[in-house]
């Protein structure tokens, strides 16, 4: 029945315009004009619909009212043929009482074809059960389609000989505008289970794509060419076989997905080639803002989102609980070596992939910032995996509680050109790189500023905080690496064949807790051809709980440069070595070091060297401990060069070298102060075995041991030039120096040139004990042995030669040119009188002043003062000059007054 009622037309037009005004803003297609005439269908059958369509003019409305079904259910019209729309028509399907009326294809035909130049508007109506062996199960659109509060459901395309597209709608060179519209349970034998779009303009607001499926691409939505805008639109539980479970977009330069849109629980299901469980983009420019990607799954890559050769912009979104089952990118997979993307202010939470990139996989050029990666998981790169072609710039990003096997927080095989304000906390790797893992087959670099690596764990492997290997250059500025834990090596940092630069940072409270193997490097472990530079870095309170070495730093086969570094309170427990620093088969140059309170439970409390070279300057080594040898420093088969170094207050409880133990080592020392070290065997200050050392402008004071309180020389060749040995004690022999027995192949030879020995004490040889052995030799020149506090000054074998030297008693029996025996040296107490080390300044009337005749003396004294200052050079380590204070008057004046 056809009823033309002008009044009803006006009422309905006003209602429709009200809905349009409330629901449509910023649409790509203009709002339809008010209908000219309304044609109402009360008896719902195909004949009446065909008649209404035939009689409708351009701009008319057909109101499918279906009153004959009142009041039981909404009515339905089942079509037997597809209807051609060649004019602009509005279909209104509101049932006055019970809801929306339906138009059905009866699972036998597509319902509409909208021709070029025509517009079909669907308002408050359901279109369902369309079937087409071609494309467009319910609608083919070549003109314009406007859907307002419409539903398209259970439409399909199917053809055994082809793959038709668009389960509900096929749009080609068209305009499609959707508002509050639902695509539900539609199926395409090809692409676009819900909606397929080619070279068209699409906008969707507050719409839904639910439970649609495509045998190829785009379970909910597919678009090639054209432009797209989705606002507050949901794609959920859609399925594609290959790509784009929720949506597939290709060659679309303008794509907006925003305003709390949701991509949820979509899937791509092919076990060999499925990508982009939630969304797939290729050769496009998607702009995504305030979108939820939740619970999507791809059997291969890109569980939430897959972007290939596209310019991806992803902002203010939640990417959560997505899965890429078999390759990469649980949350987001960004592909294309020439692709550029921007990812900012997103939450990546609980995503999973195997094996690469639980939260994010990057193959291209990504600029990222203000993102949070939380509880993501993947074998490689729980939070992020950066491929070898990938380039990352990453700012203000947090990696928290991510898990994986290698690189739980972030794993990079490519470049990180710049990282700033990054935090890695409580990430756990089953093997290596709890927080960060960097590996490269090329020569890639990573730079981070203001980076924090806190409480990360490598459960069974290496590098609790950071792991780097193979041609990687890792540079950190203002870095904190603290509280990380590992089973084997490098609780803070582990590196092999890599370059590590840390500028201004703290590496503290990291822990190696392995209990079944030798484990090393509580703070840092470097090996292979690695290079290390530390500038202004604290390496404090790191520890190894079982067998191992290098409580603070363990460097094996590496080259290291350290400037202004602290190594404090680190521990290498059990039968371990190198509480602060362990260096083996490598070279280190250190300028500016404080090493206090470290424990190498066996040896090298502060520093341990083995087959290594250490150039150490401007250092304070204090209060470290070892149970056996080298409480401060132990050098084994090594070169140890010291300049302006203080080694003090150490304990080596059971063996040798409480301060320094040199075993088959060599070196040149200058401006070294060794004091207050206590050992129970040999060499409280220094124990040298089979070593060759030249020591200049240095002081050994207040050290204690059984033999050789200051220095114990054993089968070594020592030259002491401008050296002060003062106030050392031995419970047995050689309070100042003990020159031990030797062999023909390795004689003990000590040469003392302008050396002062004073106030040392022992049972025998208070200042000097020389073993009575044919291969033990001692040479004395311009030196003084004075004021032994117990026993005589000398004991044992006589000096092989001596000249211009003085002994304050007769025990040294000095013979030769210019020597004096039994003469008071008249020296001031030990103190600073210029220079970097304490000395005994001669009194003005000391016999040492101008005692040396000729020119056989060093050019400068221990303080650096030029020799000579008078008629001749002074004997001993200090050359008195006219400007020196007369401390002696302060000592003797009370006696004179008395």
Image (tube, helix red, strand yellow):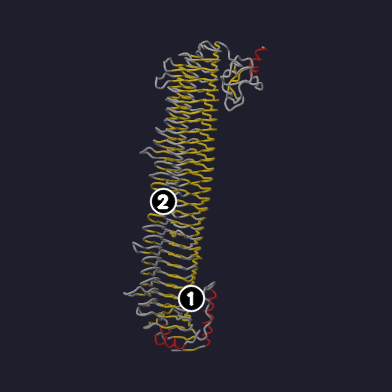
Find numbered disc 2 in the image and state the secondary structure of the residue it sits on.
strand
Of callouts 1 and 2, which one flags the residue occurring earlier in the amino acid sequence? Answer: 1
x and y, in percent, of residue 347 in the image = 48, 57
Front residue of 170/512: it is 170
Q: Which mark is residue 403?
A: 2
Q: Which mark is residue 143?
A: none
Give the side of residue 888 with respect to residue 751, left or right. right
Q: Position of residue 713 (x, y in %)?
A: 45, 22
In x, y percent, where is residue 765? 48, 15
User: Residue sitting at 53 percent across and 34 percent down?
Assistant: 594
Q: How many other residues sit within 10 Å of disc 2, few (<14), some (14-19) or many (≥20)?
A: many
Residue found at x 54% / y 40%: 536
Question: Could you tell me how far apart the alpha carbons at marks 1 and 2 are, in whole angstroms?
Answer: 46 Å
Q: Quadrant of the C terminus?
A: top right
Q: Is residue 852 above or below residue 560?
A: above
Which quadrant of the figure contains the N terminus? bottom left
SS label for mark 1: strand
Q: Vertical placement of 654 versus 77: above or below?
A: above
Q: Which residue is mark 1?
A: 175
Q: Position of residue 763 (x, y in %)?
A: 47, 15
């Amino acid at each position: 029945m056809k009823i033309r009622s002008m009044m009803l037309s006006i009422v309905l037009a006003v209602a429709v315009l009200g809905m349009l005004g409330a629901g449509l803003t910023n649409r790509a297609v203009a709002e339809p004009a008010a209908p000219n005439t309304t044609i109402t269908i009360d008896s719902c059958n195909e004949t009446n619909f065909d008649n209404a369509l035939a009689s409708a003019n351009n701009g008319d409305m057909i109101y499918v009212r279906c009153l004959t079904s009142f009041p039981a259910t909404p009515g339905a019209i089942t079509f037997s043929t597809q209807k051609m729309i060649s004019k602009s028509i509005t279909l209104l399907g509101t049932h006055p009482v019970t809801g929306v009326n339906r138009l059905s294809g009866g699972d036998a035909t597509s319902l509409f074809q909208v021709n070029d130049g025509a517009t079909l508007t669907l308002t408050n109506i359901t279109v369902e059960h369309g079937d087409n062996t071609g494309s467009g199960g319910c609608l083919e659109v070549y003109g314009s389609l406007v859907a307002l509060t419409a539903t398209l459901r259970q439409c399909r395309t199917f053809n055994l000989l082809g793959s038709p597209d668009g389960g509900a709608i096929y749009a080609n060179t068209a305009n499609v505008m959707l508002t509050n519209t639902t695509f539900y349970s539609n199926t395409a034998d090809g692409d676009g289970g819900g909606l397929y779009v080619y070279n068209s303009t699409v906008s969707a607001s507050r719409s839904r794509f639910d439970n649609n499926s495509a045998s190829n691409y785009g379970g909910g939505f597919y678009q090639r060419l054209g432009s797209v805008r989705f606002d507050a639109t949901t794609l959920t539980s859609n399925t594609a076989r290959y790509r784009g479970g929720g949506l597939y977009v290709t060659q679309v330069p303008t794509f907006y997905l925003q305003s709390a849109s949701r991509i949820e629980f979509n899937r791509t299901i092919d076990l060999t080639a499925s990508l982009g469980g939630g969304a797939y983009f290729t050769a496009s420019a998607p702009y995504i803002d305030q979108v939820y990607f939740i619970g999507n799954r791809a059997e291969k890559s890109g569980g939430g989102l897959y972007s290939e050769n596209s310019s991806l912009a992803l902002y203010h979104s939640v990417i959560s609980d997505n899965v890429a089952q078999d390759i990469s990118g649980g949350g987001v997979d960004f592909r294309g070596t020439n692709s550029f993307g921007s990812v900012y202010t997103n939450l990546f939470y609980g995503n999973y992939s195997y094996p690469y990139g639980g939260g994010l996989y990057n193959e291209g050029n990504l600029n990222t910032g203000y993102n949070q990666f939380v509880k993501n998981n993947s074998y490689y790169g729980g939070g992020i995996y950066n491929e070898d072609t990938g380039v990352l710039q990453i700012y203000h990003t947090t990696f928290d509680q991510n898990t994986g096997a290698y690189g739980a927080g972030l794993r990079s095989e490519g470049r990180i050109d710049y990282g700033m304000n990054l935090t890695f906390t409580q990430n756990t790797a089953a093997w290596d790189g709890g927080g960060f893992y960097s590996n490269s087959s090329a020569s890639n670099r990573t730079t981070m500023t203001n980076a924090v690596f806190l409480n990360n764990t490598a459960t069974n492997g290496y590098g609790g905080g950071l792991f780097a290997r193979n041609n990687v250059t890792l540079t950190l500025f203002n870095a904190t690496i603290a509280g990380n834990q590992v089973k084997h090596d490098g609780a803070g940092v582990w590196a092999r064949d890599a370059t590590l630069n840390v500028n201004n940072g703290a590496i503290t409270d990291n822990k190696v807790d392995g209990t079944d193997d030798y484990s090393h490097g509580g703070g840092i472990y470097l090996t292979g051809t690695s290079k290390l530079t530390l500038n202004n870095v604290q390496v404090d309170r790191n520890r190894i709980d079982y067998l191992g070495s290098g409580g603070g730093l363990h460097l094996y086969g590496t080259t290291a440069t350290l400037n202004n570094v602290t190594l404090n309170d680190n521990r290498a427990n059990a039968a371990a070595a190198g509480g602060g620093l362990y260096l083996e088969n490598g070279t280190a140059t250190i300028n500016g070091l404080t090493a206090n309170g470290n424990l190498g439970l066996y040896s090298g409390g502060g520093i341990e060297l083995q087959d290594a070279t250490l150039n150490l300057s401007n250092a304070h080594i204090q209060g470290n401990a070892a149970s056996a040898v080298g409480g401060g420093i132990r050098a084994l088969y090594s070169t140890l060069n010291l300049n302006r170094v203080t080694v003090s207050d150490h304990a080596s409880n059971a063996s040798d070298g409480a301060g320094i133990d040199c075993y088959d080592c060599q070196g040149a020392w200058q401006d070294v102060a060794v004091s207050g070290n206590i050992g129970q065997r040999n060499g409280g200050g220094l124990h040298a075995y089979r070593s060759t050392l030249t020591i200049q402008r240095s002081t050994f004071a207040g050290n204690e041991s059984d033999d050789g309180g200051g220095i114990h020389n054993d089968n070594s060749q020592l030259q002491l030039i401008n050296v002060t040995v003062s106030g050392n004690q031995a419970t047995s022999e050689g309070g100042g120096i003990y020159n031990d027995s030797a062999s023909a192949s390795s004689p003990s030879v000590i040469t003392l040139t302008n050396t002062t020995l004073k106030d040392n004490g022992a049972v025998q040889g208070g200042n000097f004990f020389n073993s009575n052995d044919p291969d033990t030799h001692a040479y004395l020149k311009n030196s003084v042995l004075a004021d032994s506090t117990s026993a005589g000054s000398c004991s044992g074998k006589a000096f092989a030669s001596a000249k211009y030297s003085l002994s304050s008693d007769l025990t040294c029996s000095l013979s030769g040119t210019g020597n004096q025996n039994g003469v008071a040296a008249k020296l001031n107490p030990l103190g600073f009188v210029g220079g970097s080390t304490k000395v005994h300044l001669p009194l003005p009337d000391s016999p040492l002043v101008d005692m040396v005749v000729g020119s056989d003396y060093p050019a400068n004294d221990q303080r650096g003062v030029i020799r000579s200052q008078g008629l001749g050079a002074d004997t001993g380590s200090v050359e008195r000059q006219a400007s020196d204070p007369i401390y002696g008057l302060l000592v003797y004046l009370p006696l004179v007054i008395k």
